[in-house]
Every structure is written in structure tokens, then in C-alpha cells.
Amino acid sequence: MAHFTKATSVKDWLNQRLAIDTIEKVMGSEYWIPKNINFLWAMGMVLVITFVLLLVSGIFLLMYYQPNIETAFYSVNFTIMRDVDFGWLWRHVHGVAASVVFLIIYIHMFTGIYYGSYKKGREMIWISGMLLFVAFSAEAFSGYMLPWGQMSYWAGMVITNLFSGGSLHADGLVEWIRGDYVPAQAFLTRFFMLHVLLIPLAILGLIALHFGSLRIPHVNNQDGEEIDFEKESKRYLNGDKAGSKVMRFANDFMSKDMMVVGVYLIFFFYLVFYNYGFAMDPVNFDPADGLKTPAHIYPEWYFLWSYEILRPFSVDIGLIAFGFAQVIFVLLPFLDRSPNTVAANRRGLFRIWFWMMLINMIILTAMGKLPPSGIYSTIGFFAAILFIAQWIALPFITMFEKKV
């Protein structure tokens, strides 16, 4: 049994039972960060802040939202937006955060790819991060259903139809997911539960896993330098802070994080007050009507690239391509066969691969918002083919990469 002594303070009492000093050292004052990193490494903290904004604003919206197909639309667009004091502000914060969080996720993700932060023992950092991306995607989709507008209804109809498996005709599975033949009360109720309870719990657990997976291999650095963290941390603790290649997470690096967060919050609240419209589809301001199909159904911007990979092909091939796009990023640590953990600009063909992938995903995103006809359809088709071809080629172009 653990040995307990008479506590000298509340902190000492808690420390004997919860080891709060140990936790603080493990996650803060003795968690070491390389000095040779740039502001892009602050995106993780920006994501945490954005998630907190989503949680807080979501709690306030939850106080007035009614998960009923007869009243959901009006509870959002009239009760919250017009009757509740500052209800419009909380909705704007929630809507903008739900959109901007994916911009930050993509920046964070492509920073990791560019600097090889998924290699050499950091596989679990990458995999847990991609699981977080999946969880945020599920959270965004379930939240998009809740206003019960036209695009909510029809996006729900289209996305759940994907589970029929094309020629497999797994219509029973689709009906089981919806709880009905078409999106209706059961559909709204279960997606409400997923959005406010189950998926947020999964996200919290995955955030803990993501931070935990950073503890042993530590974060990467922009030079790809292999740092002896034990040696450098001792130098830091012995007073040679300038000569050490590392710094404490708390409060040294966190102060740099907070500066980036401050700049981000200026940008964020500018959007909230002056440009919130981008996060709210005009079609979704019409009540859901199962008898009136919108002229052009499309998801939110952060799903457009994968939607465009689905669209140019026949049903079965499109579903295979779509499934490929959903899982392939998770496999990146095992597809990249290079021995180098350095920035892409020092990796020959991989540098070309990286920039082609980034530009191609932007093209796919742009084409996904446009009607699938004429030149747009042709560009979308070739962009989708290129996306798949690039991932198939990745093991081969990295296999023969010379050690830097």
C-alpha cells in the first residue's frame, strides 16, 4: 500500500493521491521540445483551442436546440438566431469553428507530411492524428444534419446511400443507419446523440492518445535532426539554456504557442463577426423537404476533395476510389520507404510528389463544388486518377531515395 503522510497543504494532499507533480513534469515542465521548429508546430495547440470553442458554443446551442423534425429548423433559425440574446453569436462561433478547424487540421496534416513527422518511431503519432481526423469528420457530418435544412436532409440522404455498397445493394444497412427508409425522426435523433455525446467522447480519448504518443519519440523538427533529448534536457536543467537544443513545453514553448493562438483568434473572430456566411450554406436556410431535391447537392468544403474522387466514376468504381481515399493517408508511414526524416525540399522526387498532391487536392476541392458537367467533369476525372496514381507510386519513388 502507498505511504501517506500528514498533508501540509491542499496541493500536497492531492499530490499524494493523484501524483499531480509527476503529471505536470511528464506533460509540461519536463516535456522537451526542439528549438529548431517554426510556427507550424503550434497548430496542435490551435486545434485544442478551436475544439474548446466548439464545446463551449455547442453547450450553449444545446440549451435551445430541439431534436425534432418538426421544430429543429425553427429552433436553430428563429429561436437561437432571433429570440435568444446573443444566440446568433454562439451559432456563428460554432459554425465558423466547425469549418476553420478543418483548415487547421489540413495545415497540421500537410506540415507532418512535409517534415516527415510520421517516420522513425512516430507512426502512432500519425495514426492517432488520422483517427482524430476521422472523428472530426464524423462530428462535422452529424452536426450538419441537425439544422434540418434542405442541404442537411439531402446530404444525409446521399452520404448514407454510400453504405448500400453500389451493386451489393445493402439497402438494409442503409435503413438500419437511418432508422427508416428515408431520413426522418429516428435519423435526426441518432445523429443528435452521436454529435453531442458519443463522438465528442471519442475525440477527447483520441486527443489524449495523440498527446500520449508524443511523449516517447517527441515531436520532430524542421531540420530532421536526431536530438538526444536526455542529454540536451540535462544541459538545459544545468543552466545552459542557450546552448541546449531543447526547451520546456511549459511554459517556454507554450508562450510561443499562445502568440500564434492570439493571432489565430484575431482571424477567427474577424470571420465570426464579418464573414461567417462561408460556414453556412444558403440552401440550408430552407426547411428540409423530401419532395424537393436541390439542383446541386454537395458537402461542406472540407469534404469536397474526397467527394470529387467518388463522382467521376461509375457507382462501384467510385465507391472503391472513395474508400481508397479515406484510408490511404493512414497508411502513409508504411508506404513511405525512404530512410530520411527530413523536410520534403531535401528529398528529391518526394518533394515533387508532395507539391503535386497538395495542388491536386486543391483542384479536387474546387471541382467538387462545381456541377459535374463539361470541362469540370473532365478535370475532376483526371485529378481523381492522378490522386490514386500518386499514392500507388509513393512506395516506388521513396524506395530508392538516397540517405541524406
Image (cartoon, rainbow, N blue to C red):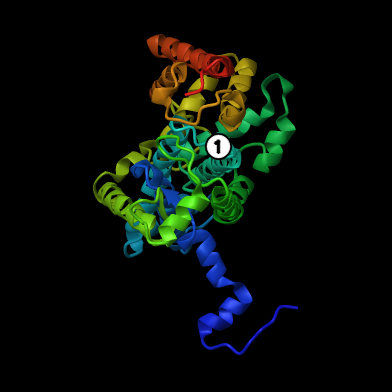
* Residue 117, placed above or below residue 148: above
Mark 1: amino acid: Gly
In the image: residue 232, left or right of residue 119: left
- At numbered mark 1, what does the secondary structure look like: helix, strand or loop? helix
Residue 17 in percent (x, y) is at: 63, 77
Residue 9 in percent (x, y) is at: 51, 86
Depth check, front residue: 281 or 199: 199
Q: Residue at x 54, y 14 (%)?
A: 389
Q: Residue at x 56, y 30 (%)?
A: 329
In the image: residue 108, left or right of residue 290: left
Depth check, front residue: 90 or 353: 353
Q: Residue at x 32, y 57 (%)?
A: 89
Q: Residue at x 57, y 40 (%)?
A: 122
| Residue highlighted by disc 1 | 156
In the image: residue 89, left or right of residue 302: left
Q: Is residue 309 visible?
A: yes
